[in-house]
């Protein structure tokens, strides 16, 4: 049988190579880093369909991928999709040669036991789900016989949440190759008229407009996306590997009755409550802002930007307060002040002067915020406390349980606490529990270029309270989801579901009691059971599934705040529902059993509070080697060499881009590899408001295909392998590589283009960009010529000092690192000489994880 090398991407970074040659027992089913790109498209995704049906906000999405092995030998093929973070996987199956293998949802411990048994039989592999901003990964693989096909089918459920007056259905499409039969079909059926709709996202671009078809009737909407093979490779969000983006369906519905919308089916009901035309309630809002040392640089800069915008959006009848804290508490004013023009101007001046320093006293800061709100009661107003922090408590009271108890005792359920956790260093579990215990929510703010917009976006969701102390009552119903809500905000929606327990009811009655700006309000409705049951839908069971979905979500949140027997009882109830409705939640896993002789895999629901790195350590990767291979010292040695440092006589090439770090006064520079197609933060200097990000070329490339520079507020320079575009906020200039020498000078910005070199100076940063053309590849490479001290980013690391040890080891910052003698092209020079270097893993070279440098947008 011929030896076949295949590849896939694990968590967007790890390149995996499987040798499908049963005679090579030593390395069969092992995982290696640095694998060559496929020389031919021997695995063909010939059909990729996504079908999403939304019935009254409840979406059931089915992804079907049909893959063919075109080789005359068996081949491992992969299924890798991204699903929304709020979704629950509810079904997975593989069909191979007319035989179907179904995933089974089990209690997490039971699933783990089955997995361990598979490992003990020498069948080992694990399925990894990553936490991103809006999406999670699902991936699996299976060996397919020569000239055979496999069909993968994944189903997930999701209740769309209304934010800022809109529902959003996010569908990601990343087949990683052009597909002859590619279809996305979305069908939306609402019982009320659709009032607004739009299609957005990375796949809704000018190039793909003709591939999108939209039609709408009163209560229904259809969206179809059928791109041709050519369109899948020619659009901005496409490449030779096909589509890579998302489709965002945005809509809202009419609300003719202020009492809300009722639906019932098969003994279950759902009540959607989002009254319109209510006078807004003035708010009392206190912002508690972490200014400790860990907020240094970009985090602090983005927090200041967000706060300046938020302060500008306060209404004249709102009252507000500002608290900054590190080891000490700094209160802007000891009482709430009205959002007058004079007070806002003074507050903005205070925000601009916030400086990071010291440790983190969360307890004292939050209690001070509670004190300020409690000392300023206003009838007909709604109070909100917002905490922004990026770390654990390290000063004052540091016991997290005591802090949570102190805050809960101080607030006493009077107003919500919202906790915003900045970055992945924050203890999200701690913030989540503290928020949930006080009628609020916790949300992670991702440390990206738009973090200030994330902060503003969250504030916008709670900026306009319309009702407080909302109580939902239902006669003749039981097993209700949450019925008490501290506040209802403009643009949101309250959803309650339950079981109709009284079958003799002639009418179903609802009652909503709340407090508005000036008085208590009551919304009542009475609907004939005959009329209510007559409202049918395409999916008659969707209301029951919606009830189960919402119940599990709320039970898992409730479980976070409880202890002892109460906690176990709620957990047991959530687990029972998860198993009954086959939801993959944090309490369950899906066991994917494959054909005899292959591994068992387990799909977990990742937890937001846990950081998911985009790479694996050597120890973690070794856990994936079958036990019989681990027992061989030779196999471990071979694995370590191939995983970390391939020898020069191996035919395994690097599917990544190689970087160099200068090492003045030492024999060789340091080099390291980064997997292709990453978007990276290259340079960042918050003090001068300069940022440079770059996107690496696809598999097999050598450099960058796009690089973006941003300086102060208005200066933006975007380089591609075709052209260069610059704007200063008012004027736009376009350059083309190879044109006559051009010199453009503006305030603190200099652009000089000479042939295939662009010399750029922005403030105190100077970078020369080279357009290289090597063996058919065209790519960009930046050479940093001048930068201030303490520059952040991958290219900010210069003159790395190390000590050579015996046995191909180097010592960096008292850490011994396995090194490999290798070579690298220095693309920072026009001649691009090939020089010798010590190849070491990325984390050792930069003393940080790759995830610390990845960005979502350039």
Image (cartoon, helix red, strand yellow):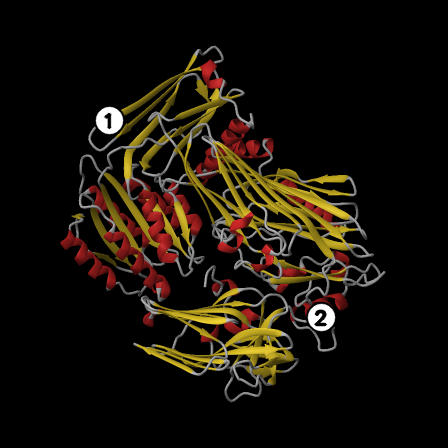
The front one of 527 and 723 is 723
Q: Residue at point 74% right, 39% down? A: 100
Q: Farthest residue in the left direction?
A: 342
Q: Secondary structure at mark 1?
A: strand
> What percent of the width, then of the height, locates residue 557?
45, 39
Q: Evaluate whether residue 46 shows in this view.
A: yes
Q: CA distance from mark 2 to mark 1?
A: 72 Å
Q: Secondary structure at mark 2?
A: loop
Q: Residue at point 46% right, 18% down? A: 532
Question: In the rendered structure, which disc, 2 or 1, sits on the residue that comes first in sequence?
Answer: 1
Q: Which residue is mark 2?
A: 652
Other-residue count near label 1 (Cα within 10 Å), few / some / many at <14 / 14–19 / ≥20:
few
> What percent of the width, then of the height, locates residue 768?
45, 80
> Does 603 sit left or right of 444 as displayed?
right
Q: Quadrant of residue 659?
A: bottom right
> Does 667 sit left or right of 77 as displayed?
left
Q: Evaluate whether residue 397 shows in this view.
A: no
């Amino acid at each position: 049988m011929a030896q076949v090398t295949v590849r896939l991407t694990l968590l967007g970074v790890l390149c995996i190579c499987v040798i499908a040659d049963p005679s090579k027992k030593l390395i069969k089913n092992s995982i290696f880093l640095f694998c060559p790109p496929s020389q031919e498209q021997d695995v063909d995704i010939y059909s990729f369909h996504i079908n999403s049906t939304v019935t009254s906000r409840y979406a059931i999405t089915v992804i079907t991928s049909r893959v063919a092995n075109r080789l005359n030998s068996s081949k491992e093929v992969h299924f890798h999709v991204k699903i929304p973070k709020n979704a629950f996987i509810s079904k997975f199956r593989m069909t191979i040669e007319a035989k179907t293998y179904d995933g089974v949802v089990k209690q997490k411990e039971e699933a783990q036991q089955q997995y361990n048994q598979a490992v003990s039989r020498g069948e080992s592999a694990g399925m990894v789900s990553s936490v991103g901003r809006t999406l999670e990964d699902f991936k699996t693989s299976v060996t397919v016989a020569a000239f055979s096909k496999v069909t993968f089918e994944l189903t997930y459920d999701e209740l769309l949440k209304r934010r800022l007056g809109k529902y959003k259905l996010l569908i990601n499409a990343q087949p990683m190759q052009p597909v002859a039969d590619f279809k996305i079909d979305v069908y939306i059926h609402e019982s009320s008229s659709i009032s607004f709709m739009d299609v957005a996202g990375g796949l809704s671009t000018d190039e793909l407009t003709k591939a999108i078809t939209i039609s709408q009737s009163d209560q229904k909407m259809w969206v179809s996306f059928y791109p041709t093979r050519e369109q899948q490779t020619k659009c901005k969000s496409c490449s030779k590997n096909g589509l890579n983006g998302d489709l965002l369906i945005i809509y809202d519905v009419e609300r003719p009755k202020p009492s809300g919308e009722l639906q019932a089916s098969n003994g279950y009901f759902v009540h959607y409550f989002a009254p319109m035309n209510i006078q807004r309630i003035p708010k009392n809002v206190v912002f508690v802002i972490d200014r400790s040392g860990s907020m240094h640089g970009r985090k602090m800069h983005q927090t200041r930007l967000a706060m300046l915008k938020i302060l500008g959006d306060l209404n004249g009848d709102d009252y507000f307060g500002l608290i900054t804290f590190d080891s000490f508490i700094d209160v802007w004013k000891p009482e709430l002040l009205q959002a007058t023009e004079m007070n806002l101007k003074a507050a903005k001046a205070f925000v601009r002067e916030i400086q990071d320093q010291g440790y983190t006293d969360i307890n004292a800061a939050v209690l001070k915020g509670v004190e300020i709100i409690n000392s300023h009661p206003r009838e007909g107003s709604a109070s909100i406390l917002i905490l922004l922090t990026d770390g654990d408590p390290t000063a004052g009271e540091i016991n997290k349980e005591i802090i949570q108890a102190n805050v809960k005792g101080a607030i006493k359920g009077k107003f919500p606490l919202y906790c915003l956790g900045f970055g992945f260093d924050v203890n999200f579990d701690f913030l989540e529990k503290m928020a949930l215990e006080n009628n609020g929510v916790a949300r992670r703010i991702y440390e990206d270029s738009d973090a200030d917009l994330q902060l503003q976006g969250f504030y916008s969701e709670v900026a306009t309270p319309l009702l407080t102390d909302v109580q939902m009552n239902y006669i003749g119903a039981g097993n209700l989801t949450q019925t008490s809500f501290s506040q209802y905000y403009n643009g949101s929606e309250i959803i309650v579901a339950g079981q109709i327990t009284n079958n003799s009811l002639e009418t179903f009655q609802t009652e909503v009691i709340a407090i508005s700006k000036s008085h208590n309000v009551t919304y009542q409705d009475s609907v004939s059971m005959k009329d209510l049951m007559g409202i049918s839908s395409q999916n008659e069971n969707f209301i029951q599934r919606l009830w189960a979905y919402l119940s599990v979500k709320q039970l898992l949140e409730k479980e976070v705040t409880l202890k002892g027997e109460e906690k176990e009882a709620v957990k047991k109830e959530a687990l029972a529902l998860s198993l009954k409705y086959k939801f993959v939640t944090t309490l369950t896993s899906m066991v994917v059993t494959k054909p005899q002789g292959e591994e068992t895999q387990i799909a977990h629901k990742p937890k937001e509070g846990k950081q998911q790195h985009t790479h694996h350590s050597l120890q973690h990767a070794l856990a994936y080697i079958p036990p019989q291979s681990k027992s061989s010292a030779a196999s471990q040695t071979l694995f370590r060499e191939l995983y970390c440092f391939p020898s020069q006589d191996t035919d395994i090439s690097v599917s990544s881009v190689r970087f160099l770090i200068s090492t003045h006064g030492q024999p060789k520079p340091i080099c390291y590899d980064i997997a292709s197609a990453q978007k990276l933060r290259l340079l960042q200097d918050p003090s001068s408001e300069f940022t440079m990000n770059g996107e690496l070329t696809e598999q097999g490339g050598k450099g960058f295909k796009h690089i973006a520079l941003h300086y102060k507020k208005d200066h933006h320079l975007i380089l591609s392998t075709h052209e260069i575009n610059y704007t200063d906020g008012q004027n736009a200039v376009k350059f083309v590589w190879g044109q006559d020498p051009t010199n453009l000078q503006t305030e603190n910005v200099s652009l000089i283009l000479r042939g295939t070199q662009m010399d750029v100076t922005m403030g105190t940063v100077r970078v020369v960009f080279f357009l290289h053309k090597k063996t058919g590849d065209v790519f960009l490479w930046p050479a940093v010529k001048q930068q201030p001290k303490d520059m952040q980013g991958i290219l900010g690391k210069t003159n790395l000092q190390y000590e050579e040890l015996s046995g191909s080891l180097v010592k960096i910052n008292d850490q011994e690192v396995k090194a490999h003698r290798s070579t690298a092209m220095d693309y920072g020079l026009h001649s691009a000489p090939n020089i010798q270097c010590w190849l070491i893993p990325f984390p050792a070279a930069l003393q940080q994880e790759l995830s610390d440098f990845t960005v979502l947008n350039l």
